[in-house]
Image (tube, rainbow, N blue to C red):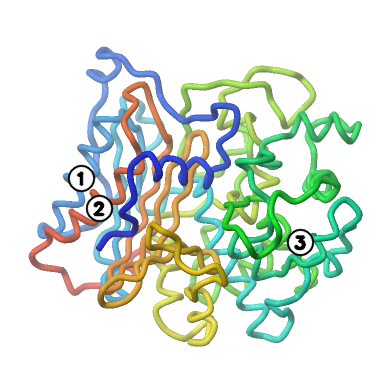
Amino acid sequence: MISETFSVSRRNALRLLAGGAAAGLAGGLPTSPASAAARAWSVTGRSATSLKPFDDTLKRFMTDRAIPYASLAVVRKGKLVLARGYNWTADTSFSAGPTSLFRIASLSKPITAAAVLKLAQDGKLSLSAKVAPLLGLSTTADPRLANVTVTHLLQHLGGWDSGVSGDPMFRDQVIASALGVSLPITQAHIVKHTSGLKLDHAPGTTYAYSNYGYVLLQKIIEKASGVSYASYVQSKVLTPLKISRMTLGRTAKSLRKSGEAPYFSQYTGKSVIDTSGSVVPFPYGGFNLENMAAHGGWLATAVDLAKFTTLFDAAGVLTSASISKAFAKPSIGVNPDGWYYGLGWQVRPVTGGLNTWHTGSLAGTSTLMVRRYDGLSWVVLFDQRDDASGLNYGAIDSLLHTAANSVKSWPTNNLFSTYGL
């Protein structure tokens, strides 16, 4: 009935892979009874009395985990019925609202997949195209690389497995040392280094979540479109939906966008965005967000992402045929847990249709986007992903399904126009 029904431990593993967790990267905010006592609640945005279960769920979830900021948007049958910002903090310098920008981490992948589908729909790219010749990648290190297709990248079937060889998106120092270059490394460095390694699996045989595969998709989008990745996504995917606030994020704290949430982590690490060797909060230099554009680099508001989910409800930007491809079963079929990864979406067949969703996780970020078979969708964005309590953040998925199922009366108004959509 819900997005996924496997165990908490398995969900944790998926979320960590989705965010590219490496070397113990975790988001959290050290808390104490004193700091908790100093906090105050404020809730912004629009809702309805009948939707109180959503407010109650977010408040409990954030209080238990000492999460400072969050935003939630809920859509029913194409209409935005709830748009909220939640603040549990003593800091009044920022207030989260329905149009506050958050890093969305791997919720970037469905956006990238939509761009690829649009290119294919317009005859500028074949989903069965071989990636190596398309991008001029050498297959000397592993001839099997020649068999990787665009579809393999979209479905995480390319043969790279972070559980075996590590995630190259979080190996900046290793790659810099191997190539004899200085930090920060670029996407070109990552591609050069990774193309020189053997694949962990034969292409098309094994599902293994791969951030790197989506870096290659970014390069393919740029090659096929002739413009930058961000330009293509904004002009062909977002603008037709009237989404104008979304933008690619920046790593450095000093480059935070106006209206962007701050990010919190229990952890620090050496900066990978300069050669200083300085120790920084993990969200602000423990990884290179600029390199993650297509797999984890977007900033968005919950309202904008809620509008993005409607792209898949009916033909428009994408045709019905393209939408069907997004949710079609991969060649390897459904996994033992009853779900599969389509083109940028996790998919669970349920009675009545499909539940589709994606999670996102980086130090300082925990996100979830759900499209339910019954016409309900929601997006929730948090500015940290774990904390001193040790409580699970993936639990928000089932909690929001429970909240939705407890609503007795749904409003019929549409708030999209209230927020410029």
Q: Nearer the viewer, residue 335 or 154?
A: 335
- In this rendering, the answer to whether 30 lies above or below 9 is above
Residue at mark 2 to residue at mark 1: CA–CA distance: 7 Å
Asked where in the image residue 409 lies, by quadrant, the reply is bottom left
Q: Quadrant of residue 309?
A: bottom left
Q: Which residue is mark 1?
A: 57
At x 44%, y 51%, the residue is 359
- Looking at the picture, which amino acid does disc 3 mark? Lys
Q: Secondary structure at mark 1?
A: helix
* Mark nearer the N terminus (2 vs 1): 1
Question: Are the residues flagged by discs 3 and 2 in contact, CB closer than 8 Å?
Answer: no
Q: State yes or no: discs 2 and 1 in contact (Cβ < 8 Å).
A: yes
Label 2 crowd (10 A; few <14 / some 14-19 / many >=20): many
Residue 155: x and y, percent?
58, 64
Is residue 312 rendered to the left or right of residue 60? right
Q: Earlier in the sequence, mark 3 or mark 1?
A: 1
Q: Quadrant of the N terminus?
A: bottom left
Which mark, residue 400? 2
